[in-house]
């Protein structure tokens, strides 16, 4: 992991800040965040949370059992400072904590002098 690094790129016009995870001079992770004031909790229907003791994988509106359902959000906003716009890790680098490292970097550095 000696060649691993997180780099930051800001776009002041859109308000988006990008964090890149670089390993061996290749980008293997990306996190795009925005400073926000409120957020809404995502609600997944509880009757669809498990089917035959298998967790449902949400992908393109379908689950493992091919039962489609909608995901909604709460009506009441909550205070928030950091919104995740996009997150991606190269398939061959997943399950190594890269996404968590990117989110931690954003929490530590998005707002100067404050950890979110």
Image (tube, helix red, strand yellow):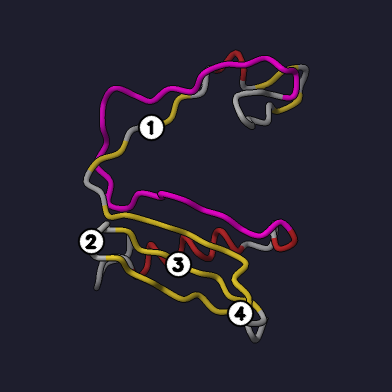
Query: Sequence-wise, which precedes: disc 4 or disc 2?
Result: 4
For this view, does 36 lie left or right of residue 88? left
Q: CA distance from mark 1 to mark 3?
A: 24 Å
Image quarter where the C terminus lies is bottom left
Question: Outermost residue toward the bottom?
Answer: 2
For label 2, count other residues whose C-alpha is less than 10 Å away and answer few (under 14), some (14-19) or many (20+): few
Q: Which residue is mark 1?
A: 41
Residue 19: which disc? 3
Q: CA distance from mark 4 to mark 1?
A: 33 Å
Which residue is painted at 26% across and 26% down in the image? Answer: 76
Depth order, front residue of 44/92? 92
Q: Which residue is mark 2?
A: 13
Residue 87 colored magenta? Answer: yes
Query: Sequence-wise, which precedes: disc 4 or disc 1?
Result: 4
Residue 90 at what x, y percent from top left? Answer: 66, 60
Query: Sequence-wise, which precedes: disc 1 or disc 3?
Result: 3
Disc 1 is placed on an element classified as: loop
**Disc 4 vs disc 1: which is toward the camera?**
4
Point out the stretch of residues depicted in magenta.
64-91
Which residue is painted at 55% across and 70% down in the image? Answer: 21
For label 1, count other residues whose C-alpha is less than 10 Å away and answer few (under 14), some (14-19) or many (20+): few
């Amino acid at each position: 992991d000696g060649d691993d690094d997180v780099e930051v790129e800001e776009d002041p016009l859109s308000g988006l800040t990008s964090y890149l995870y670089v390993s061996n001079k290749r980008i293997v992770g990306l996190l795009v965040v925005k400073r926000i004031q409120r957020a809404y909790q995502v609600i997944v229907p509880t009757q669809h949370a498990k089917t035959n003791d298998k967790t449902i994988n949400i992908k393109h509106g379908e689950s493992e059992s091919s039962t489609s359902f909608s995901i909604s959000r709460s009506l009441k906003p909550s205070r928030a400072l950091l919104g995740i716009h996009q997150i991606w890790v190269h398939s061959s680098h997943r399950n190594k904590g890269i996404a968590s490292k990117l989110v931690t970097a954003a929490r530590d550095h998005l707002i100067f002098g404050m950890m979110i």
